C-alpha cells in the first residue's frame, strides 16, 4: 500500500504557475490524471444556461491543477513542505519535513 503525497482535505500551497503562493484546501484528487481541485485556486469562467432553478450567466469554477505544482502547507513555518513517510502508533503516516509533524 503506497501513501499519497496529497489527499482530499489537505491544506496545500501552489508552488508554481499563475497562482503561485496561494493556499487552499483540496476538494478532490484524481491520481489517474495526476490532478487535484483546490478551493480558490485555478479559477476559470464557465457559461451556464438559464434554467427554471437558476439564472444564466457566467460562474467561477475551480479547474483541476497538476499535483506536481502542489505542496502540503506547513502552518508552523508558513510555507510549503516536502513529505516523507514514517510510522506512528503502528500506522504509516505522512510527515512534514520542515516541522516533523504528522499530517
Image: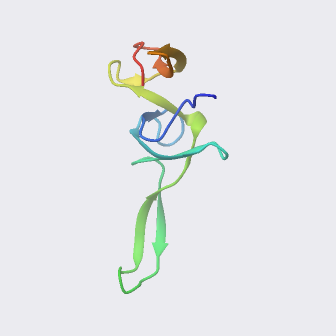
Question: Looking at the picture, how far across and down is residue 7, in whole percent?
Answer: 50, 37
Q: Please, which residue is most extreme toward the front here?
A: 90
Does 93 appear above or below 27?
Answer: above
Question: Looking at the picture, how far across and down is residue 81, in whole percent?
Answer: 47, 22
Residue 84 appears in the rendering: yes
Residue drawn at x 35%, y 82% is 53
Q: Total number of numbered labels? A: 0
Residue 15 appears in the rendering: no
Quadrant housing residue 2: top right
Q: Say which of 80 and 2 sits in front.
A: 2
Q: Please, which residue is most extreme toward the right here?
A: 32
How was the colour assigned to the protein in this rendering?
rainbow
Does 57 appear above or below 3?
Answer: below
Q: Say which of 5 and 81 sits in front.
A: 5
Question: Looking at the picture, how far across and down is residue 4, in whole percent?
Answer: 57, 31
Q: Say which of 16 and 98 sits in front.
A: 98
Q: Say which of 38 and 86 sits in front.
A: 86
Residue drawn at x 67%, y 45% is 32
Q: Please, which residue is most extreme toward the left here?
A: 76
Along the horizontal axis of the image, is 36 left or right of 41?
right
- Can you say which quadrant of the picture contains the C terminus? top left
Question: Looking at the picture, how far across and down is residue 24, in whole percent?
Answer: 39, 40
- Can you say which quadrant of the picture contains the N terminus? top right
Residue drawn at x 58%, y 28% is 3
Along the horizontal axis of the image, is 71 left or right of 50?
right
Does 45 appear above or below 32?
Answer: below
Amino acid at each position: 500500500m503506497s501513501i499519497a503525497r496529497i489527499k482530499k482535505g489537505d491544506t496545500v500551497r501552489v508552488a508554481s504557475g499563475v497562482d503561485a503562493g496561494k493556499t487552499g484546501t483540496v476538494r478532490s484528487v484524481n491520481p489517474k490524471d495526476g490532478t487535484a481541485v483546490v478551493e480558490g485556486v485555478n479559477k476559470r469562467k464557465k457559461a451556464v444556461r438559464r434554467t427554471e432553478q437558476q439564472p444564466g450567466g457566467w460562474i467561477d469554477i475551480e479547474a483541476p491543477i497538476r499535483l506536481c505544482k502542489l505542496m502540503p502547507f506547513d502552518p508552523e513555518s508558513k510555507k510549503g513542505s516536502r513529505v516523507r513517510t514514517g510510522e506512528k502508533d503502528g500506522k504509516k503516516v505522512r510527515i512534514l519535513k520542515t516541522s516533523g509533524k504528522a499530517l
